[in-house]
Amino acid sequence: MAHGTVERQGAKAPAGPERVGGAGWTAAWLTGAVTLSAEGALALVVYFLAGLRDEHYFAAGFSAYVGYLLVAVVTVVVLGLAGMTGSAAVVLPVVRLARWSARRTGRAETLRWSLAVCGAFATAAAVCSGVPAVLLGGSWTVLPLVLVAAFLGLVPAVLCARAVTVLRGTGVRFGLAGVVSACGLTVPAVVLVGGLVAYVTGLIQAYEPPRLTAAQLVGTWTDDQGGTLALRADGTAVADGLDVPTAEAASGGDASERCSGSGAWARSAAPSGTPQLDLSVGGCTEGIGWQFGGTEEKPTLFFWIGDPDSLDRYTLHRGSTAP
């Protein structure tokens, strides 16, 4: 009889993490929420820094800065709400699923087991979102992209939340939640400051508009809506259907008209010292300084419509080379 008792005790499942109560799961939920929010903030910071290498323009002035501040505040609030929702809807269920499945299979709930459950969840998410996209005519690349994004986004939050549940003591659990919160605020800020310093010092090259020469300006430019501008090597220009602002727009309105005619062009310098195109065609383009945008390979000509802080512009793209 005693021998049978010993056998049953030896066959018991491996010990798992200590059971946690309501306060422990609250700490885990907060930890998962902060981790998800920090991941979102880091992704936005990386996206912003990477975008500085591409063509971009920022509005200036007091109203623009107030707008940027409001966008930042709204972004922080949205990230916080998204993190709390995602932690409750995804992170905690995955942590519980890893614990439940480990016990059901007689295994210990290890980090490897938690990673496997994260992989299973990411696979399910990829199939549920990727298959309908493919059936609707999308690319099969949606499946691996969603799989990788879901796995990489889920793993840090799940492991941090799991660590909270493994610790003993409510105070220690909330202490770990505080540490994760501090790191979540620090890492995106450090990456942002480091990236800006890299751009300022020239370690990473930020976008600069092309400085087109007169020879590079020669050719046909189009607005992709039927309007064209032909710049010839002898300094003459022919416009056909350019959409330029009228006198009413120049005085504060937003009216424009299609301009056609012939005239002259020259490469000059703007008051800031950057090169620009001066164009005089039929009197309808007087006073407009065309700036250079795009890249050396795909240059553009543009001018701001109304206040430059609106970032609304009329753009011509490079067409064929003029004879």
Image (cartoon, rainbow, N blue to C red):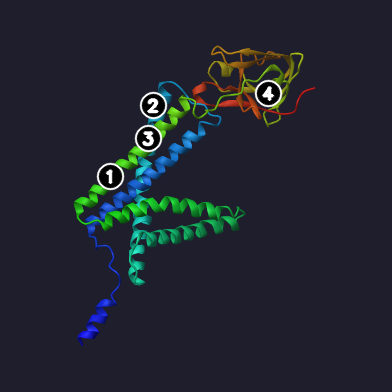
Q: What is the CA distance from the residue labelled 2 to the residue labelled 4?
A: 35 Å
Q: Quadrant of the C terminus?
A: top right
Q: Position of residue 210 (x, y in %)?
A: 61, 23
- Whichever of labels 4 and 1 marks the residue nearer the N terminus, that label is 1
Q: Quadrant of the N terminus?
A: bottom left
Q: What is the CA distance from the residue labelled 4 to the residue labelled 1?
A: 59 Å
Task: Examine the image and state in which quarter residue 218 appears.
Answer: top right
Residue under pointer 3: 190
Instruction: Inspect the image, locate mark 4, and give the three-letter code of the amino acid beneath it.
Output: Leu
Q: What is the CA distance from the residue labelled 3 to the residue labelled 2?
A: 23 Å
- Whichever of labels 2 and 4 marks the residue nearer the N terminus, that label is 2
Q: Residues within 10 Å of mark 3 (few under 14, many from 20)?
A: few
Q: Residues within 10 Å of mark 1 (few under 14, many from 20)?
A: few
Q: Residue at x 54, y 13 (%)?
A: 272
Residue under pointer 4: 242
Instruction: Inspect the image, locate mark 2, and give the three-letter code of the amino acid beneath it.
Output: Val
Residue under pointer 2: 66
Q: Residue at x 30, y 72 (%)?
A: 13
Is there CB contact under 8 Å for labels 4 and 3?
no
Local secondary structure at mark 1: helix
Residue under pointer 1: 179
- Whichever of labels 4 and 3 marks the residue nearer the N terminus, that label is 3
Local secondary structure at mark 4: strand
Which-is-in-front pick, marks 4 and 3? 3
